[in-house]
Amino acid sequence: MSNDTADTSGTSRQVELSDKDLPLHCPMAGAPLWARHPRVFLDVVKHGEALCPYCGTKYTYKGGKKGH
């Protein structure tokens, strides 16, 4: 992961991703056991960002948008 920053309250997180982090699923590998929820795959490439419906983590894609 390129950048992983959490606010001081611990209630929201923002994570920057690159091509090497795709495909994206939340929670990501290595997440602590207490932070786990059902795995959900998120499409960050289409809009450049995605929000996890379970934990609210905001993922931002920094690898440039891909064309189909």
Image: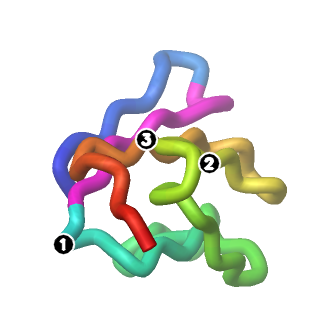
Query: What residue would you read off at disc 2?
Result: 50
Give the Cα distance between marks 2 and 1. Answer: 17 Å
Which of 44/36 is in front? Answer: 44
Q: Is residue 27 left or right of residue 29?
A: right
Instruction: Give yes or no for residue 19 being in the magenta stretch.
Output: no
Which image quarter is the N terminus in?
bottom left
The earlier-in-sequence mark between 3 and 2 is 2
Q: Which residue is mark 3?
A: 60
Residue stretch in magenta: 10-18
Are there few (<14), some (14-19), or many (20+) residues within 10 Å of tag 3? some
Residue 36, position in %: x, y?
A: 64, 72
Q: In terms of secondary structure, where does tag 2 sit?
A: strand
The amino acid sitting under disc 3 is Thr
Residue type of the residue flagged with mark 1: Lys
Is there a contact, CB below 8 Å, between mark 3 and mark 1? no
Q: Which residue is mark 1?
A: 20
Amino acid type at image mark 2 = Ala
Q: Would you call the spot at circle 2 few (<14 residues within 10 Å), some (14-19), or many (20 or more)?
A: some
